Amino acid sequence: MVSRVTERTLIADFSLAVGRLRRQQAEAQDALSSQKRLREPSDDPVGAARSTRLRGETKELGAYRDSVTIGRSALAAEDGVLGEAHDILIRAREIAASLSGGLATPEARQTAAEEVTELERGLLSLANTTVAGRYIFAGLSTTGPAFTSFDTPGFSPATAYTGPVDPFAVRTARDETVRITTNGGDVFDSSLQAIDGLRLALEAGNEPSGNLTALESAAEDIRQERASVGGRLARLQTRDQEIGSAVLTAQTLLADVEDADLTETITQLAQVQNALEATLTAGTSLLQTSILDYLKF
Amino acid sequence: MAIFAPLTVGRQALLASERAIGVTGHNISNVNTPGYSRQTPVLHATRPDYQGFGTGVEVADVVRSVDGFLDARMRTSASSLGGATTGRQLLDRLQALFPVGDLGVGNALAEFFASANGLADSPQDLAVRNELLEAGHTLASQIRSAAGGLATLQREADQRLGQAAFDANAILQNLAQLNREVVAASRGGRGANDLLDQRQQALSELAKQLSIQVVEEADGGVNVFAASGQGLLIGTDAATLTTELDPTHIGLDGNPLSKIGIATRDGGVISLSGDIGGTIGKLLGLRDTTFPDDAAALDLLATNLRDAVNAVQTNAAGRDLDGNVGVAFFGGTGAADLDVAITDPRTIAAAQGANLADNSNAIALAGVAQQTFPALNGATLDEFFGSLHARIGQEARRAEDAATIEENVSAALAAQREAVSGVSLDEEFTNLIRYQRAFQAASQIINVSNILLDDLIGLVR
């Protein structure tokens, strides 16, 4: 504190103090109305960088969540299709079993052949299932169909699959990709061949007991693939929950970095307001005091 | 002791009081004049007569209350304040180029790689491809506009140098004139109090522009030197600060920047050297170090992003939607002209190998976000941008703090100066009463002398 105080010192101090308090008031007001503690990088330089990273991370997690959603919808569709395909194989096995042995007439076998043909068509159509225009058993390709039509001349179950060899994988984390398709040939070749074999045997009026093993093992293949699909579906569900909690963590951290603590800000505002009122009251009464009021010349 | 002596004494006293009231009035009139130092009449008893009798009073001198050390300290503070204020202004604008929240380069970067991940989900979907293209455009334009903003700020700093030189020259001319008047006044034995105040004020103004050393001469004049020792004002001879374009110093916008220095008689310019200080020193620091450094970091980000993305896009196994090897995604030579080089979303290479429904290349593209770069000190793109972001925030924060501190120092010094040199109305009015009473008393001396004379003359009748 200086020893000699003039009117100008008082005025300068007063306007400096009021200016400073007004600035604090404006800052608190800005923090309240924006509800943000962090409004420009200099408010908290490290926090600004952190906030940008957290926002980036949230976007990245959002992208992974989109991937998981796509994966889950494809895998769920595959699961449904494989279930129906399994039913078809079971039905085919029933037919084969019921027409085995010497009791069935060749006519009955001919008739059954027609049903098996329909089962084969059904299986092919299941193998050609699309989700949003993408063939789920052809690496999610939009160009299809995955399997050639039953009516194509020279149709053979062994060469029916025309889709890509490589499966399709989605990226669900920085270092994790989850395979969501299986080469359609690998999934359906055994089933198509078993049913096709049954059809040919029945059409020829032959006894189909020799086809039972193939049908059985084809059904086993489908069950195995279905188990694999189920496993990956479960992985994606877990991943979805993981992402959900990671997003929550990022948002909580982001709020910590960015958001104003309302209680604190309001308290600050009240404090500043008090100080401002006190300064104004004291200042105006001080500055109005003048020797001139007491002098008579 | 003659009968007329009291009359003379009274007249002297009247005159002295009048002058003292005049000085007080001068103080009161200048109560709000910036840089004014209060003046005090110095009253002396006049020389006694040959018999040793007192002969009255006179105002021997009028002195101004100043503290020379404080003035020098205030000039240093003015230089720091000038620099800090300029720094705060320009760095506040700099940080506005790098906003927080859902804006800016950092967000565009995250958005771009999220879109790349989206492409990996649906590699054949044109809408998704378009989205990636758009995200690329946004990212490139965010980086471009930050780089453009830096170039604009650098150009502004350069232009402000010219303005600062212009202001400094006007002050130097004024100082030369004041030097002339001060020297003439002291030679003529006249007081130069008000001129000295004005000169002090002008020196403080000059110190805002650049750090100065002030050396007082015996004749009352001052010489002014820059911090490097280069002469700015010798007696009445003022140097001229000038800026001229320096073709060897190219700014971020590709045009030459200017060099600031002292004009020589033959039309050349001698650059200011050393720690220049003040507004000019700060402008040079921002223009030649801060802004170019930030721009270089942005350039590094842009070129590494461009090269990494293009490397994935143009790799020999990559295939676009029509089965062709991909082409470069980003074009440009740096941050200032970074742009998306392709227009057809089909030409983005999302697949590897013959299977066009494959997404391996899109996954590789999304993986660039996690790639670390030796050129970026082993950081990923977003980590590197994060550190640049934090650095800019810190620069702005430091500038704000420095300006606040300098304002406080300057206010404290101003209060100290006011304590020594400021006019206090309380004091002045008290003095006014004092001198008024003295005047009234002196009048009484004359009155009494007059009566005595009357009596004396009455004896003759």
Image (cartoon, grey):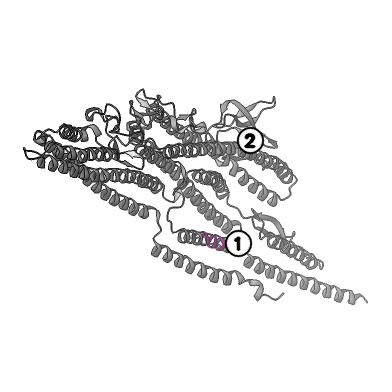
- Magenta span includes B114: no
Q: Nearer the viewer, residue B398 or B268?
A: B398
Quadrant for residue A202, please give it: top left
Q: Position of residue A120 (x, y in %)?
A: 23, 37
Residue A243 visible to the viewer: yes
Is residue A18 shown in magenta?
yes
Q: Secondary structure at mark 2?
A: strand
Residue closest to the eye, A286 or A268? A268
Q: Residue furthest right?
A: B461
- Amino acid carrying label 2: it is Leu
Is B258 above or below relative to B210? above
Q: Quadrant of residue B439?
A: bottom right
Q: Is residue A167 left or right of residue B106?
A: left
| Magenta stretch prevailing secondary structure | helix
Above or below, A11 against B406 in this view is: below
Give x and y (percent) for residue B76.
Answer: 54, 45
Q: How many tags in the picture?
A: 2
Q: Name the residue rendered at 62%, 46% in the picture.
A: B205
Quarter of the picture containing the C terminus of chain B is bottom right
Residue corresponding to mark 1: A8
Q: For this rendering, which residue is in front, B328 or B7?
A: B328
Counting from the top left corner in percent of width and height, residue A34 is at 46, 58
The amino acid type, in three-letter code, at marker 1 is Arg
Point out which mark residue B232 bears. 2
Horizontally, is B340 left or right of A167 in the view?
A: right
Q: Quadrant of residue B60?
A: bottom right
Is residue A173 in view? Answer: no
Residue span colored magenta: A14-24
Q: Position of residue A113 (x, y in %)?
A: 19, 37
Q: The numbered mark 1 sits on a residue in which chain?
A: A
Label 1: state its secondary structure: helix
Please rate how many residues cluster around mark 1, counting C-alpha atoms within 10 Å: few if below 14, some from 14 to 19, many from 20.
some
